[in-house]
Amino acid sequence: MKKREEYIEAVRNYSLYSNKQRNILAALIESAIQDIATISPRVLSEVTGATQPVVYKAIKRFIEDGIMESLNTKTGKLGVFKISTIKLDEIEEIHEKTKNLKNK
C-alpha cells in the first residue's frame, strides 16, 4: 500500500468511527501487503485491545461501508480482507480538508 502512513493518520482522525473501530482499521491497514490484509479477528483483538465481539462488529461495519471485503477461506473463517484504497482515499481527502479548515 503506497500511502500507508497517510491512510493510518486519516483513519485515526476519522470521526465517523469510534476509537476502537479506528484502531482496528489502522491495524488492518498496517498489516496489509498491497491491499490485502491477512490477520485473524483474534489477532486484531490482541493487537488493538478490543474484545473479539467488538472486532467482529467493526469488520461487519467496514464491509457494509465498502472499506473492505472479506475474502473468506473455504471454511468461512474471517482473516483475509481486501481493503478498498478508493474508500481510504476518500477518508484521507476528508482528513485533509478538515485539517485545512482547522488551520485557517
Image (tube, rainbow, N blue to C red):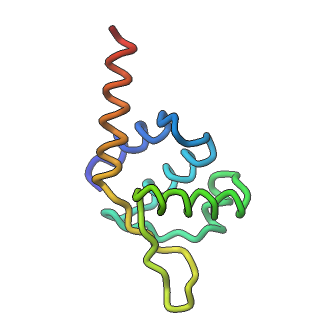
Is 63 left, or right, of 90 in this rendering?
Answer: right
- The quarter of the image holding the N terminus is bottom left
Does 88 appear above or below 51? above
Does 90 appear above or below 73? above
- The quarter of the image holding the C terminus is top left
Does 13 appear above or below 37? above
Residue 101 occupies which quadrant of the picture? top left
Q: Residue at x 73, y 58 (%)?
A: 51
Image location of residue 93, percent across then percent down: 30, 35
Residue 100 occupies which quadrant of the picture? top left
Image location of residue 83, percent across then percent down: 38, 61
Is 35 left, or right, of 54 in this rendering?
Answer: left
Residue occupying the far top of the picture: 104
Q: Residue at x 58, y 48 (%)?
A: 21
Q: Residue at x 44, y 54 (%)?
A: 30
Q: Residue at x 56, y 90 (%)?
A: 75
Does 55 appear above or below 3? below
Image location of residue 89, percent across then percent down: 29, 45
Residue occupying the far bottom of the picture: 74
Residue 32 occupies which quadrant of the picture? bottom left
Q: Nearer the viewer, residue 30 or 59?
A: 59
Image location of residue 42, percent across then percent down: 66, 68
- Tally the marks: 0
Is 91 left, or right, of 50 in this rendering?
Answer: left
Residue occupying the far front of the picture: 64
